[in-house]
Image: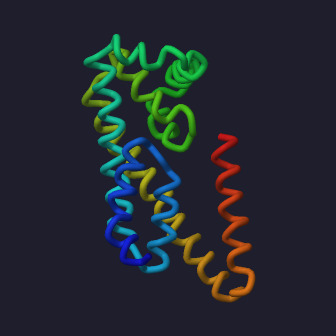
Amino acid sequence: MEAFISDWGYLALALYSFGGGMVALIIAGIFSASGELNILYVVGVAVVSNFIGDQFLFYLARNNKAYAKNMMSNMGRKIALSHILIRKYGVWVIFVKKYIYGVKTIIPLVIGLTKYDAKKFIIINALASMVWGVVVGVSAYYLGQLLLDSLEEYKNYGFVLLGVLLLIIFLIFKRS
């Protein structure tokens, strides 16, 4: 299993982060704490992949407006929420949207449909991706180390604690 994680963990993280996923980064951070992955590579792969994914969505909408509008046709409420967030908070939406399930893939599409400056989006998206990767990855690394230490201390209850932790994480992301 360790060889599988070492061989394919970074690729899985890259593919999942391309779509804006945070769960893979959390899991990779925990694997980094156990020594199976390198936290610097985990954060780097997640940041680059997330940045490329958002740029892809931005330019997809920018260059194929009809396709992007058609693709988002059944997401009226999320698009309306995205417009409100962009008007109200401006640039900060690009930073915050990385943590909000449901709008993190819509915001780059919506911004791509507007006349927002592409160079400005590249810079802000790069900074937001870096902040996202470092905050989530490093937090998962340290919390993963804490979790692993707890599992070592309470070996008999380890699977129960891990199950409860995963259930809590699942419920948090499901409600978001």
Coloring scheme used: rainbow
Outermost residue, top direction? 66
Horizontal side, residue 124 vs residue 149: left or right: left
Q: Residue at x 30, y 50 (%)?
A: 48
Rendered position, 53 above or below 135: above
Q: Residue at x 69, y 87 (%)?
A: 155
**Residue 130's spot in the image, x, y percent?**
37, 51
Residue 52: quarter of image: top left
Rendered position, 38 above or below 76: below
Rendered position, 106 above or below 171: above
**Residue 31's spot in the image, x, y percent?**
47, 72
Nearest the eye: 71 or 149: 71
Q: Residue at x 42, y 49 (%)?
A: 16
Nearest the eye: 118 or 47: 47
The C terminus: image quadrant: top right
Residue 44: quarter of image: bottom left
Nearest the eye: 166 or 93: 166
**Residue 68's spot in the image, x, y percent?**
38, 18
* Badge count: 0
**Residue 108's spot in the image, x, y percent?**
40, 29
Q: Residue at x 52, y 19 (%)?
A: 83
Horizontal side, residue 147 vs residue 52: left or right: right
The N terminus: image quadrant: bottom left
Residue 161: quarter of image: bottom right
Nearest the eye: 45 or 155: 155
